[in-house]
Image (tube, rainbow, N blue to C red):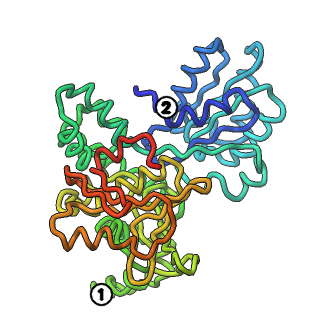
Amino acid sequence: MIKREMYMSRIRPFIGGELVKVMTGMRRSGKSVMLELIKEELVEIGVDPSSFISINFEDMRYDHLLTAKALHEEVLHRAETIDGKAYLFFDEIQEVSDWEKCVNSLRVTLDCDIYITGSNAKLLSGELATYLGGRYVEFVIYPFSFAEFLELYHSIAPDASVPECFRKYLVAGGMPYLANLQYADEPSRQYLMDIFNSVQLKDIVKRNKVRDVDLLERIIAYVMANVGTTFSAASMAKFFKSEHRTVAAETILNYIKYCCDAYLFYQVKRQDLRGKQILASNEKYYIADHGIREAVFGGNMRDINLILENIIFMELLRRNYTVTVGRIGEKEIDFVCDRRGERLYIQVAYLLASEETVAREFGVYDGVRDNFPKYVVSLDELDMSRDGIKHRNIRDFLLMSEWN
């Protein structure tokens, strides 16, 4: 179990405080492990584990607690035996109906410190906003970064070079449990397929009462095939029409939104850097874990330019950047990244194999006149930095602690 200090450093200031700590993210991305890491920290600072009340709502032993009232009564009953503050850990809380009423009531009536996890972005919308508005803090937990993968993979293959580890990461992705399978190819693929099927069935189909599962599967396959590629719902509808399937663009958008709510895909909007407005059409989508794409769809090495882009995008989210695609005239910059007023530009390429490719990838910045850092990242080993634009090998870039 690696410490995931990137997340712990953000959560630590809120430990022991009255705000409800909410950890969201795709199923099996490591939220339960974060609860265990928080418990370890609490024990280290002197909290008695007998003060912990932990319930995982995917465990059938707790089926009788899947209503707000039943859970509330159970927690109050258990808390009677705790001397001092109770520490509540609720895993996959979305399984409990009206859970937000229960959590809010416990927050008000009990001396407690509350941690919850959930696998749906809607967790913090609607009802919760009413009951817990301003009284919670959210942390999105993502699959392993390359740095985290490297740390874990070296515990299994200590002699593997960084390039060898990166090649494995390109195919396996960052789902934490794969280490338990020693990253063996077939068991890993089976596990990733099972995660995908679980996300699709539990977090998308059941939660949103999707009737046309065949259409959903086709839409997911289309988005997977086109990660990092600009497309619109209208172009997808045209594609389905060519396959003799008539689908409204609105239906396609709804189904993709369900996938985004389940943290399977992330949408990136396009921004006109001259007019400074967000463009209304042709978004890009990236997948939460490129290993799942390889297991379900295949072709990560064939589509390596898209996968490299996907890996950089997810790393930007981990580092708390807000990301758009930047358009300037006829040119597009892969990622325009903002974090508390700091800006960063990143262009991703597979290899800068010719002078023409170098001119194209560096040339996207011709119209950008500010002094914020501008990067071109690729798998090239030689540094081709020029005209104030930094070139980095993508492995080195992912392992840098800061990019400014």
Q: Amino acid at mark 1?
A: His
User: How far from the left and from the top, in percent, is residue 27?
Assistant: 45, 46
- Which residue does the image show at 50% across and 43% down from the upper left? 141
Q: Locate residue 336 relative to residue 291 in the image: left or right.
A: right
Residue at x 41% of width, y 44% of height: 143
Q: Is residue 284 left or right of residue 114?
A: left
Q: Quadrant location of residue 184?
A: top left
Q: Earlier in the sequence, mark 2 or mark 1?
A: 2
Residue drawn at x 67%, y 43% as measured from the top left = 137
* Residue 258 appears in view: no
What percent of the width, then of the height, locates residue 245? 34, 84
Label 2 or label 1, whichever lies nearer to me, is 2
Which structural element holds mark 2? helix
In terms of depth relative to the viewer, which is nearer, 178 or 332? Answer: 332
The residue at which mark 2 appears reads as 5
Quadrant in which residue 172 is drawn: top left
**Position of 70 relative to 260 (above/below):** above
On the question of residue 14 being in view, the answer is yes
Q: How would you rate the neighbour count of disc 1 (Cα within 10 Å): few for under 14, some for 14-19, many for 20 or more?
A: few
Check residue 377 in the rendering and tell me which mark sits there, or answer none.
Answer: none
Reply above or below: 142 against 82.
Answer: below
Q: Amino acid at mark 2?
A: Glu
Q: Residue at 30% of width from left, 35% of height from top?
A: 150
Query: Which disc is residue 244 wearing?
Result: 1
Q: Which residue is outermost to the front?
A: 387
Q: Quadrant of the N terminus?
A: top left
Q: CA distance from mark 2 to mark 1?
A: 50 Å
